[in-house]
């Protein structure tokens, strides 16, 4: 006796395409929002490719500001500041593009266009973050390194990074730390760090300036980023201050699309962003080698 089976009946077993979709999540921008955006309004479209940032010599205590002998009317000693400038070049462009045969436009799920557009913007933002994290001249990778590659980041290493900010009189407001998921996992095994992260995160997540915020350690707002630059066996985390790196988006995420009839019949869409960044204060940050 022969029975019908799933194999023999496969032609008549209906398949239903869900109108919903499972989404592969891309992280939104984490690093870019924490950088220094003060010069961004000066480099709009049609304003060239360079912002000249004057550097002002900050006033610090100096023995030359004291009179040599009190009550004698001694002559003043004048301080001659030597001022420089930093050039912020808008010289980078990130692009994400797709195309499809026109017949597919009539057959694909309606939700796909929405997901595709969201994905383009998220991918461009992730690229901008990755560029800062891995740039060897003006990104995290260009700062003096502390810690040990592939080894847990300890409380002592974090204190060393914070002490550097204290030594150079970096303001308390605007300090941050970016850590990889593995570094976050190692840090929360240290009681004092776990308690600080937990206490500072309770009730404060919605008020934070960017996604990825996981709490505060000492004076540092801590963010977790899965896309930091890899070391030999670990990741390159970072402790810094907003004023360390200046950034500018001359053109924000912009979408363009049209019909291509030269290569066939294709609907094509692309998104792009034009931007640049530069280290302004190299002492206001430390690359933190770890896991």
Image (tube, helix red, strand yellow):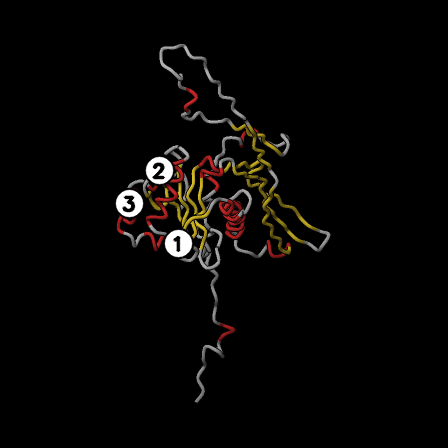
Instruction: Name the residue nearer the viewer: 281 or 46.
Output: 281
Q: Is residue 222 left or right of residue 229?
A: left
Mark 1, residues whose alpha carbon is within 10 Å: few (<14), some, or many (≥20)?
A: some
Q: Residue beneath label 2, please?
A: 207
Q: Residue beneath label 3, please?
A: 196
Please report the residue visible at 45 percent of the width from the left and 13 percent of the height from the top. Answer: 75
Secondary-structure class at tag 1: helix
Mark 3, residues whose alpha carbon is within 10 Å: few (<14), some, or many (≥20)?
A: some
Q: Is residue 116 left or right of residue 75?
A: right
Among the two numbered marks 3 and 1 on one chain, the one whose residue lies closer to the N terminus: 1
Q: Is residue 186 visible?
A: yes
Secondary-structure class at tag 3: helix
Residue 32 vertical placement versus 21 (above, below): above
Location of residue 202 by image quarter: top left
Among the two numbered marks 2 and 3 on one chain, the one whose residue lies closer to the N terminus: 3
Secondary-structure class at tag 2: helix
Give the label on residue 181, or none: 1
Please report the residue visible at 54 percent of the width from the left and 29 percent of the height from the top. Answer: 41
């Amino acid at each position: 006796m022969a029975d019908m089976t799933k194999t023999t009946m496969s032609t008549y077993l209906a398949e239903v395409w869900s109108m919903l979709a499972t989404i592969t999540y891309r992280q939104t921008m984490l690093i870019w929002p924490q950088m220094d955006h003060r010069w961004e309004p000066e480099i709009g479209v049609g304003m060239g490719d360079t912002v000249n940032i004057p550097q002002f010599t900050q006033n610090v205590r100096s023995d030359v500001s004291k009179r040599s002998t009190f009550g004698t009317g001694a002559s003043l000693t004048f301080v001659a500041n030597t001022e420089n400038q930093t050039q912020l070049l808008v010289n980078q462009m990130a692009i994400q593009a797709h195309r499809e045969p026109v017949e597919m436009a009539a057959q694909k799920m309606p939700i796909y266009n929405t997901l595709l557009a969201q994905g383009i913007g998220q991918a461009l933002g992730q690229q901008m973050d990755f560029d800062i994290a891995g740039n060897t001249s003006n990104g995290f990778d260009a700062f003096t390194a502390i810690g040990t590659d592939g080894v847990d980041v300890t409380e002592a290493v974090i204190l060393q990074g914070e002490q550097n900010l204290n030594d150079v009189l970096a303001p308390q407001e605007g300090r941050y730390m970016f850590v990889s998921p593995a570094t976050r996992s190692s840090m929360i095994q240290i009681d004092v760090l776990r308690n600080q992260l937990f206490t500072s995160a309770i009730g404060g997540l919605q008020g934070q300036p960017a996604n990825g915020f996981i709490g505060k350690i000492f004076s540092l707002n801590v963010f977790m980023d899965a896309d930091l630059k890899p070391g030999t066996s670990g990741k390159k985390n970072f402790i810094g201050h907003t004023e360390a790196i200046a950034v500018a988006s001359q053109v924000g995420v912009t979408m363009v699309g049209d019909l291509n009839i030269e290569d066939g019949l294709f609907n094509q869409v692309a998104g792009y962003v034009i931007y640049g960044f530069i280290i302004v204060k190299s002492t206001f940050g430390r690359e933190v080698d770890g896991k």
